[in-house]
Amino acid sequence: MTTLSRQVMSQVDRAVEILKKGGMVAYPTDTVYGVGGDVFNIEAIKRIYRVKRRPDNMPLPVLLAGEAQLSDVVSDVPETARRLIKRFWPGGLTLVMSKKASVPDIITAGSQKIAVRIPGHDIPLRLIRGLGRPIIGTSANISGKPNPLTAEEVSRQLDGQVDLIIDGGRCPGGMESTVVDVTGEVPVILRRGIISEQEIKKVCGECLMEVGESAHCSGL
């Protein structure tokens, strides 16, 4: 793990306790600032939708700290997914897989698919490991507003509406994660992102289709 300052570590420790109590925290990632809560706390999930003013028909993506946590939220990991995971996680690849029945339907807006990734940033990884569960990984903004790259930008949009904003400095910003649906026989790129189509094809082969954005594309 990256060495974090004592001040940031203190914020991370506080954030873990908040998450354990069903709270909501904002944190930096390898793309933009995110906001999240315990994936299995329905009240926390409802609050995220409310604070972001996010339509409830838009699923929320999930962040993991390691491959072992896939079994917490995903019912099946196809071989294609395993190859992509080996090549691109942690990092800017979001995979859409079949949801495990125990995951609250509110997260997926009733869909049987769920979007997951392991971020390439130490702070969310520490949060997830401290909580012992995956967390929601949606951008820390009001839906439709610019994605925040600093703690100050998060505060301007969500001031007083989250329990803690971890100030981990400026996020890289730029490209969002690439989103690939691996639930069918042919992997489908749902959103172009930081990992190029060419890189995906090197792993999956040429049998790859690209379609317009779906509801699962609105994550970090």
Image (cartoon, rainbow, N blue to C red):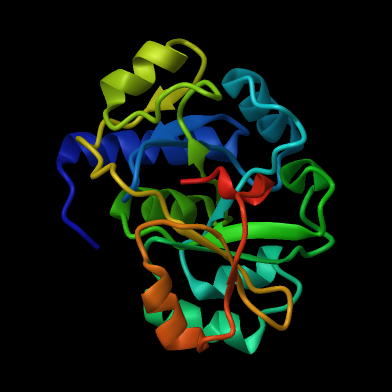
User: How many marks can you see?
Assistant: 0
Q: Can you say whether 70 is above or below 131 in the image?
A: below
Q: Can you say whether 84 is above or below 52 in the image?
A: below
Q: Nearer the viewer, residue 179 or 108?
A: 179
**Quadrant of the image containing the N terminus:** bottom left
Q: Can you say whether 156 is above or below 93 in the image?
A: above
Q: Measuring 58% from the left and 23% from the top, which residue is drawn there? A: 52
Q: Is residue 141 left or right of residue 116?
A: left
Q: Nearer the viewer, residue 95 or 2?
A: 95
Occupied quadrant, residue 186: bottom right
Occupied quadrant, residue 80: bottom right
Q: Position of residue 174 (x, y in %)?
A: 29, 44
Q: Position of residue 93 (x, y in %)?
A: 45, 64
Q: Measuring 54% from the left and 30% from the top, which residue is drawn there? A: 24
Q: Can you say whether 134 is above or below 6 in the image?
A: below
Q: Position of residue 104 (x, y in %)?
A: 79, 48
Q: Measuring 28% from the left and 42% from the top, which residue is drawn there? A: 173
Q: Is residue 151 left or right of residue 57?
A: left
Q: Measuring 48% from the left and 77% from the top, which residue is drawn there? A: 85
Q: Is residue 110 left or right of residue 67?
A: right
Q: Position of residue 161 (x, y in %)?
A: 52, 14
Q: Nearer the viewer, residue 91 or 133?
A: 91
